Amino acid sequence: MKLDPSQNIEDMKAGKFVVIEGDKNDFFSMVTDMRLDANNQDVLLHPPSQDDALLRQVLSGTSTYNIVSLRPMLMMPKGADVEDEGPRPVKAIPSHFSEVQDAMEEDVAKIFGREGDEQGKYFSIGSPLDMDTSVCIDMVRFAERSNGIFGKTGTGKSFLTRLALCGLIHFDKAVNLIFDMHNEYGFKAMKETGNTNSAFVKGLKQLFGERVAIFSLDPQSSRARGVQPDHEVYISYDQIAVEDIATLQDELKLNPTAVESAYLVYALYKDRWLRTLLAQEGPDVEEFAREIGAHPGSLVALHRKLKRLENFPFMVSKTQADGDVVDRIMEYLDRGINVVLEFGQQTSMLCYLLVANIIARRIHEMYVKKSERFYATQKPEDQPRQLMITIEEAHKFLNPSAAKQTIFGTIAREMRKYYVSLLVVDQRPSSIDDEVLSQIGTRITALLNDEKDIQAVLTGVSGTEGLRSVLASLDSKQQALIIGHAVPMPVVVKTREYGAQFYRDMGCLDDLPEGERRETIEKKTTALYGDN
């Protein structure tokens, strides 16, 4: 596009949403790059002085001009009805001299839908650059596949994740299991403004009440922050399988022989294998190794490394009287209640990897059984609820070596076959296995500087040249590029403000004045039950 001389090049931004008005079609496009040009290089060698405003004005648009690179993403026949003949993939190009206009609110709504429409599936995630209208994500399509939220440290990944989770819970498109490593999703979290004295923002429990349950690995820490957990989490040694230890090879620096020794112990003692191994002391370990035919050095190393598990206060010898924690989580999920598992002060990577693997592996096993039963009976009441599991520091679970061993790699590759998908949150997408990345349906990406991370995020996306420059030019806060299954075309958004108005949109009335709060409740009650 040749920019009109009356338009200032400094007002154009990479990622801006525009419409090319062709003869037969409108082309919905994204600004990907800009450059200055001139039809006579002498003008550039001998430019007019700063004081000669008239000459500069005469040369602008004739001898010198601005070129803006556009990437058409979708096309729509002029005058077409959105429902009957919606936006289609680009199969043509506009002709010479076609005009380019800023996208209007109606254009955005044609492409991305409107929040609160009859279908009840569109959730506003933010607004296009330099526009005051909503870009919506199709939450039905978002729930269908595994998704990723990426961005370097400090770019607001947690807030983007919280927005996405609010959309899933608000529209009830999936039930969520969230492994909350830094206690940011369940209850209040620090507002991300860079000021340590800034206010807190509400967590999912405060917004959705009984629709969210908080499980805590560190009940004392939770209560100190004013959170009363719905359930305290304890894990017995008998719940840990050898597969859970195998996924910790890098973290514990175990060699393959040590893992093979663990399988030998399991072959004899089954579920009691870990309890039996840790009960050995000093020289007894070598004698124990000879008894079971394991390499003494490897078993001693395995015993020494696994002794660290005894330092975790949530590890117990036997299952607690109130039942198996995984069974309790499954009860909540079956009732449509979203579960946030807080780690409190137990934030070591070893703890996070171990607990997330144990619980997700067994939840997945239960979902496989439920799904197989549904496929056999085909009864609607047997159909499992769609489950989305949220994990942070995802590259620890999904790097090329771990992805073949962890349950999360299995879930990502299964493509929702058993009604389970992932929401992965990570600052180093280049460390995630390529096969797993290719299965990510929707990617919400904040600023990334590393070229390898940018390339990883754009894996499997066509026409990445323009998007690469867009991604590298995002602001460090409150901007994200959204690509994939849940949006019709890539779009850069200024993310939605997570504050009082958002709380009200989600149905939380706590902060309303008493009179307005009572009036709102009466209106909702009348809408639900009628005047009588």
Image: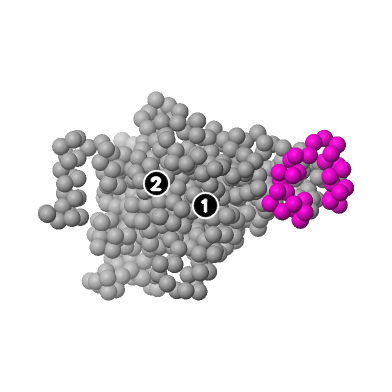
Crowd around label 1: few <14 · some 14–19 · many ≥20 (10 Å): some
The residue pinned by badge 1 equals: 327
Q: Secondary structure at mark 1?
A: helix
Q: Main secondary structure of the magenta part?
A: helix
Q: Residue at x 37, y 32 (%)?
A: 200
- Identify the amino acid type marked 1: Asp
- Quadrant position of the C terminus in the picture: bottom left
Q: Nearer the viewer, residue 48 or 155?
A: 155
**Which mark identifies residue 433?**
none
Q: Quadrant of residue 362?
A: bottom right
Tell me the CA gap for discs 1 and 2: 17 Å
Residue positioned most to the front: 321
Q: Nearer the viewer, residue 239 or 146?
A: 239
Q: On the rendered structure, is 319 left or right of 476?
A: right
Crowd around label 2: few <14 · some 14–19 · many ≥20 (10 Å): many
Contact flag, marks 1 and 2 (Cβ < 8 Å): no
Is residue 366 located in the magenta-colored stretch of the structure?
no
The residue pinned by badge 2 equals: 212
Q: Residue at x 35, y 40 (%)?
A: 206
Q: Residue at x 54, y 59 (%)?
A: 366
Residue 347 can be seen in this image: yes
Image coordinates of residue 136 in percent, x first then y, are 33, 56
Image coordinates of residue 326 in percent, x first then y, are 53, 50
Q: Nearer the viewer, residue 284 or 110?
A: 284
In terms of sequence position, does the residue under pointer 1 or pointer 2 come before the other? 2
Which span of residues is magenta-colored?
Answer: 265-294
| Rendered position, 25 above or below 300 | below
- Quadrant position of the N terminus in the picture: bottom left
- Identify the amino acid type marked 2: Val
Image coordinates of residue 132 in percent, x first then y, are 26, 48
The number of discs equals 2
